[in-house]
Image: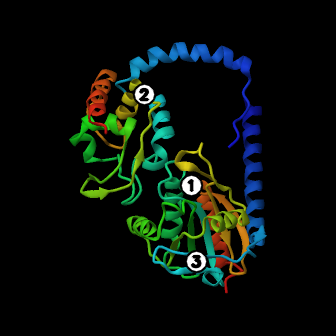
Amino acid sequence: MDKKPSSSKLLKIILPVALLAGIPMALLFSSKGDNRSQALYETHCGNCHMENGEGLKSLIPPLAGSDYLTNHPEKIACIIRYGQSGEITVNGTTYNQSMPGIPQLTEVEIANIINYINQQWGNDAKPVSAATVKKHLKNCKNSQP
Amino acid sequence: MNKLISQYIGFGLLILLGLSASCQTAKEKQTLPVIGKVTRSFQFVDQDSQVVNNETVKGKYYVTDFFFTSCPTICPKMKAQMLTVYEEFKDQDQLLLLSHSIDTRNDSVPVLKEYSERLGVDRQRWRFVTGDKKEIFEMAKHYMVTAMEDANSPGGYAHSGAFILVDPEGQVRGVYDGTQEIETQDLIQDIKQLLHGQEAQ
């Protein structure tokens, strides 16, 4: 797909401002869902888990109302970064579709995504901080083959 | 202030006029344009190892697309949209859904079978086919759909999310973006028009 050409001059002004504004915003919102979190979700997760979090039949597990989020909070960051393969049971249904990891996401971005999912579609799972994500990632990295 | 109100009324009238005009044309215009014709012969196998070829689709309306089961990008969205088409017409035996896998290496017959079972769809209404890789890509080209191997794309393949609507004469009647709900609704309306409009047999 073609990317729209953007004015480099405008970019030069907007980019540093966005970056400067983005850093404290990211820190502020790392424990709360916001539009940026939604954008992250839609870019990295929404294609498969859908914008309404329902997943796809018995192929892709739902995130909306998912018992996995509350039962295995320590695994969510690992799945986002390293992916998931093999069987996984969510709300009593066993799924077996591989999910690719998203290695380019930072810990703050992962926390934003988790917090978005945890508070969307009627979900009410505990918020996580970037530090918690870091801890969870360290634990699962050790168990990666 | 009064001027503003009269402008609003004028604008409202214009919209009403426009609406009634478009209703009129919708009634008069009952057929969809012919965009192309499927002339290439093909032979693939579906999730039940049944042959799917030109004879299978002869005399039927069908919607076709290209995907692969492990596709991490647009495919699940396409399949969710195709599912709404399926649900809308699942009792309509004049319509067939035909999804081609472009990942012939991994999407074997059993893989396609599990995929369709997990989607929970009737195997006769929605057929998932695989076959000779070159032939699948040639068919995609024939339907004017982009599909190719591409190491830089997630999952190893680049393809468009198009849904192609073909009529019983093998004529392409519509091309829709299968990742968009709004275009899928257009597709559903167009199928209804073809099935129940002047062209219904």
Position above or below: A141 against B199: above
Q: Please report the residue visible at 53 percent of the width from the left and 12 percent of the height from the top.
A: A20
Among the 4 quarters of the image, the one containing residue A84: top left
Q: Position of residue A76 (x, y in %)?
A: 31, 37
The residue under label 2 is: A109
User: For the residues tagged 3 and 2, is the chain the same?
Assistant: no
The answer to whether residue A125 is visible is no
Residue A122, image quadrant: top left
- Mark nearer the viewer, 3 or 2: 2
Q: Residue at x 68, y 43 (%)?
A: A1
Q: Furthest residue to the front?
A: A145
Sequence-wise first label, 1 or 3? 3
Q: Residue at x 40, y 17 (%)?
A: A27
Residue receiving disc 1: B181
Q: Chain of mark 2?
A: A
Question: What separation in Å lies between label 1 and label 3 (alpha carbons)?
Answer: 20 Å
Instruction: Name the front one of labels 1 and 3.
Output: 3
Q: Residues within 10 Å of mark 3 (few under 14, many from 20)?
A: many
- Along the viewing direction, whichever of B139 and B174 lies nearer the viewer: B139
User: Which label is found at residue B126?
Assistant: none
Residue at mark 3: B95
Q: Chain of mark 1?
A: B
Report whether A23 appears left or right of A97.
right
* Mark pair 1, 2: CA separation: 28 Å
Labelled pair 1, 3 in contact (Cβ < 8 Å): no
x and y percentages locating residue B146 in the rendered image: 68, 56
Instruction: Point out the frontmost of discs 1 and 2.
Output: 2
Indicate the position of residue A67 as horizontal and vertical percent values.
Answer: 25, 47
Amino acid type of the residue tagged 1 in the rendering: Glu
Relative to A83, is A57 above or below?
below
